[in-house]
């Protein structure tokens, strides 16, 4: 190939203060790992010399700690789009040191193409193989895609590729790369089943777009999933019972069950619990992130087909997948985030979405991003993409956190990401609140019934007080955040009082 081999430091040296960097991967899966730490080191050197050095970063979703964590520690990020789970960067968001734009993941690539986000100066992506054929370059990605295709096409100064030998080239053929056309009159995204191919297994570009290849060898930085808890197992059982009931009613179709599941140990455990329920038929997955329990269920035949944007699994599990890749061919496909999260496809497939809430209020609004309304946790990610377009949109949460000191069910969400209009059901370890076809008061009664027993009297007292003021959706605004205030002042929501 005529593409130069360079070091990570040489690549970082070309990126200037104020640049907008597009980074491939989705979550830690497929994130580059060598160039950005060198960029963070350069920022430290510039700062030590009294010179400013910050860059803005746009990604498919979160990225690994060697990217977000290193840059945050070096105080080297100006703006960050659109999602992150890194604790150091979260502190920077909440202190105001980094300007963070929380964005639905389905909008990310289109905002770049429209120019809303700004001009990408440099792209950094990870690949398991790069081939030059007839004057064109084929880039074969690793375990996550994100916005890599859009980055490769739009980066003004070109793209650096980290060619990571840790990832097996046996993954070739497991990607379906497709960019949505610009409006108007664009073609439909013709996916009618989860693993239907509509694109190419690689990104294709010209050699001049690649500014250098950095040879690397490092696993992804995915966390080990925490084991299931009694609460998550019961939530899985409750959700399974609810799905089966919906099938018996004819609301969803037994032979076409397609699920989406959010990110994290709780979501992973809930899907595992669903798969263990014999009354739940074999099902498909169309989601943004695939974790360890769904992969187990694919091997066992419980999941028939799975489409995802990333394989967010531990290095041990990913190595095992590479060694047994033939078990997954034809049953597993990786897609760019604008396709994994595409509202058009979500609606067409009739997906049942399962996402995780931080808190839910008694009328069915959901907060999935901010603690006490102001402190960013991670971001909305793709939960709104699925919730707004799913055939059945559910949110799960344990009824309490912090050893019972915080109730996940509150009178009024301190921040709302998902309004009552799109949320069909809430599931805790105490049951399911089916919110469909219910007025506001009926919703409140159903949700209070699945709150922790310690908090049901408090919530019922709030509803009683609120109803004295009348209205379709009764609220006593002066008391709506009393549970939040009790926690902030006394450290325990159970100490809530509704004093005049």
Image (tube, grey):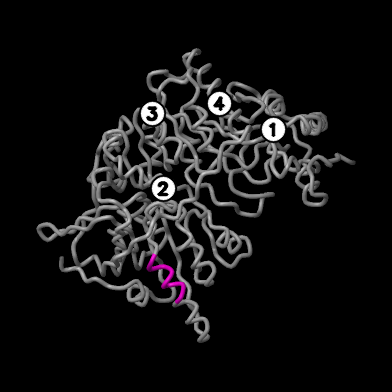
Q: How many tags in the picture? A: 4
For marks 3 and 1, the one nearer the N-term is: 3
User: How many angstroms separate mark 3 from mark 1 (CA)?
Assistant: 39 Å
Badge nearest the viewer, 2 or 1: 2
Q: Dot 1, crowdedness within 10 Å: few (<14), some or many (≥20)? A: many
Residue underneath mark 3? 300
Q: Secondary structure at mark 2?
A: helix
Q: Position of residue 218 (x, y in %)?
A: 37, 60
Q: Position of residue 187 (x, y in %)?
A: 26, 39
Q: Secondary structure at mark 1?
A: loop
Q: Is residue 26 left or right of residue 333?
A: right
Q: Secondary structure at mark 3?
A: loop
Residue underneath mark 2? 316
Badge nearest the viewer, 4 or 1: 4
Residue underneath mark 4? 239
**Stretch in magenta:** 34-41
For marks 4 and 1, the one nearer the N-term is: 4
User: How many angstroms separate mark 2 from mark 1 (CA)?
Assistant: 42 Å
Foreground residue among 154 and 470: 154
Q: Is residue 335 left or right of residue 459?
A: left
Is the magenta region chiefly helix, strand or loop? helix
Badge nearest the viewer, 3 or 1: 3
């Amino acid at each position: 190939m005529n593409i130069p081999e360079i070091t990570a430091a040489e690549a970082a040296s070309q990126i200037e203060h104020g640049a907008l960097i597009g980074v491939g991967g989705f979550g830690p899966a497929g994130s580059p790992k060598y160039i950005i730490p060198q960029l963070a080191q350069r920022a430290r050197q510039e700062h030590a010399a009294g010179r400013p050095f910050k860059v803005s970063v746009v990604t498919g979703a979160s990225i690994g700690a060697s990217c977000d964590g290193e840059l945050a520690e070096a105080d080297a990020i100006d703006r960050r789009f659109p999602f992150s789970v890194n604790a150091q960067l979260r502190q920077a968001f909440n202190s105001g040191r980094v300007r963070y734009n929380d964005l639905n993941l389905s909008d990310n690539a289109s905002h770049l193409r429209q120019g809303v986000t700004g001009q990408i100066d440099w792209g950094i992506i990870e690949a398991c193989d790069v081939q030059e054929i007839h004057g064109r370059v084929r880039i074969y990605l690793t375990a996550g895609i994100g916005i890599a295709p859009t980055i490769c096409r739009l980066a003004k100064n070109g793209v650096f590729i980290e060619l990571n030998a840790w990832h097996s080239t046996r993954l070739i053929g497991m990607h379906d790369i497709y960019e949505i056309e610009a409006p108007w009159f664009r073609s439909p995204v013709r996916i009618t089943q989860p693993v239907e191919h509509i694109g190419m297994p690689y990104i294709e570009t010209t050699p001049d777009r690649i500014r250098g290849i950095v040879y690397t060898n490092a696993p992804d930085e995915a966390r080990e999933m925490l084991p299931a808890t009694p609460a998550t197992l019961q939530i899985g059982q409750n959700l399974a019972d609810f799905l089966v009931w919906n099938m018996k009613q004819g609301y969803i179709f037994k032979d076409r069950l397609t699920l989406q599941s959010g990110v994290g140990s709780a979501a992973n455990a809930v899907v595992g619990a669903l798969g263990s329920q014999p009354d739940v038929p074999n099902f498909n997955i169309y989601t943004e992130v695939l974790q360890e329990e769904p992969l187990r269920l694919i091997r066992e035949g419980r999941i028939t087909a799975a489409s995802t944007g990333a394989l967010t699994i531990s290095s041990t599990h990913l190595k095992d997948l590479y060694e047994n890749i033939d078990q997954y061919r034809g049953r597993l496909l990786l897609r760019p985030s604008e396709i994994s999260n595409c509202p058009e496809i979500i609606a067409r497939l009739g997906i049942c979405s399962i996402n995780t809430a931080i808190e839910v209020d008694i009328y069915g609004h959901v907060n999935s991003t901010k603690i006490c309304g102001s402190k960013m946790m991670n971001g909305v990610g793709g939960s709104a993409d699925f919730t707004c377009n799913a055939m059945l949109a559910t949110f799960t949460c344990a009824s309490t956190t912090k050893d019972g000191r915080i109730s996940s069910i509150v009178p009024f969400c301190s921040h709302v990401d998902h309004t009552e209009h799109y949320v069909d059901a809430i599931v805790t370890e105490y049951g399911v609140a089916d919110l469909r076809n219910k007025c506001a008061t009926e919703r409140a009664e159903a949700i209070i019934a699945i709150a922790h027993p310690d908090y049901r009297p408090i919530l019922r007292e709030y509803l009683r007080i609120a109803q004295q003021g009348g209205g379709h959706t009764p609220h006593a605004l002066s008391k709506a955040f009393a549970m939040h205030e009790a926690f902030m002042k006394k450290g325990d929501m159970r100490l809530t009082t509704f004093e005049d």
